[in-house]
Image (cartoon, rainbow, N blue to C red):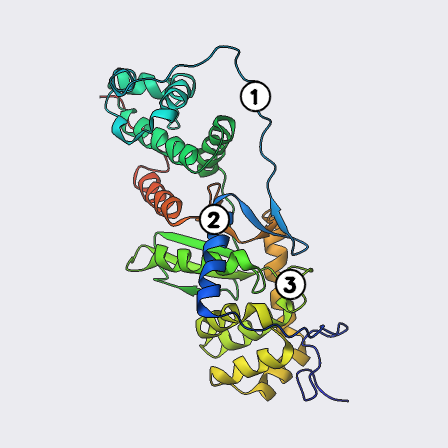
Amino acid sequence: MKSPLSSPPLPLQPRQRLARMPVSSPSRSMRKRIHIALLVLLLLGFACDRDGNTARAAPPPTPKPSPAVERTLSEEETARLLPGFPVHQIPARLRQALVSMAEDELVHDGSPFTLAGCLRDDRPCKEEAIRGLSLLLRLLQAGARESEALATYNRYYNSFASRSEIDLSGAACTGPENAAVTLVEFSDFECPYCDAARPLLKAAIAGRNDVRLCFMHFPLPGHPHAMSAAQAAIFAHRHGKFWEMHDLLFDNQRRLSDSLIRSLVEQVGLETKALVEAVKTGELAQLVDRHRNEGLRLGVQGTPTIFINGRKLELPLTAEFLQLTLDDEIRWRANGSSFRRAEP
């Protein structure tokens, strides 16, 4: 009997033959356009669901519009209502909405004051109120409705008190082992949104010694080559070649096949015969399953899903929001696992 990945190609996974569907590799300009489009969809909250299909979390119900016609606040009026906030950054069309949210929403540090109240009374919560309002403004500018922005605001800040220990056994990590912040990505090599997230995560840790990134495998059933790719990546990891293999698999995700995966293994300087033997033991598949089961335990519904020191990222996956949440995590830790500052 011929071994998996022998010639002619057989599947990496036992009991399931993977369909071979050659796809032409897109040109560099086409790939760039596709990448930009995927980044936009990431911003809107799209991801690959458990079946490998594109999915977006259902937005909260749209509130009934008020019968009154809201007037546009002037910059001067907005500055009076939100003293200390950089009101020049607020587009005219969003001033009333932001002021309304500031008047109604409590500051996220646990103080019994609204965002606007913290600003007007110059309380210790003023700094956090400015950061919270800045987050709401960014969400509105990204296209969120008021109800969506408020729901995201609350999910995000509530997540700081809701954390889980993540078993990173067998995970490939880059960055200092003793980094203050660990980013964990549950990913699928055939998920286009995971590919779009790749440069964002790489940039988030670049030049920092306080953040590391760990990769967890979460191949989706609807992606026929994802399990094979994950096993090949683990094999490469065992030989110190994970991140090279990681990039090659994503670069070629639109045309993955067993024969191409074997070729990529050779490209990083490893022997396909050794890969075949490793696959036959079942150890690689077992580790993939452990990663996937860990994700399911944590409530992972699709890819990419990001955790920061054990809390799920509840913001759109963009460079700006990644930087914001990393800064918030550092501040939260430095302040004794809290955003609240003591009254003078």
With respect to residue 304, does 257 lie above or below? below
108, 94: nearer the viewer: 94
Res. 176 image quadrant: bottom left
**Chain-order first, disc 1 or disc 3:** 1
Point out residue 194 in the picture as x, y percentages from the top left corner: 52, 58
Q: Amino acid at mark 2?
A: Val
Mark 1, residue position: 63
Residue at 51% x, 43% y is 44
Disc 3 element: helix
Residue 266 can be seen, yes or no = yes
| Quadrant location, the N terminus | bottom right
Mark 3, residue position: 289
Q: Amino acid at mark 1?
A: Pro
Point out residue 323 in the picture as x, y percentages from the top left corner: 35, 47
Res. 62 image quadrant: top right
Q: Residues within 10 Å of mark 3 (few under 14, many from 20)?
A: some
- Mark 2 and mark 1: span between their CA atoms? 25 Å
Residue 168 can be seen, yes or no = no
Q: Residues within 10 Å of mark 1 (few under 14, many from 20)?
A: few
115, 42: nearer the viewer: 42
Nearer the observer: mark 1 or 3; the answer is 1
- Mark 1 and mark 3: span between their CA atoms? 42 Å
Dot label at residue 40: 2
**Chain-order first, disc 2 or disc 1:** 2
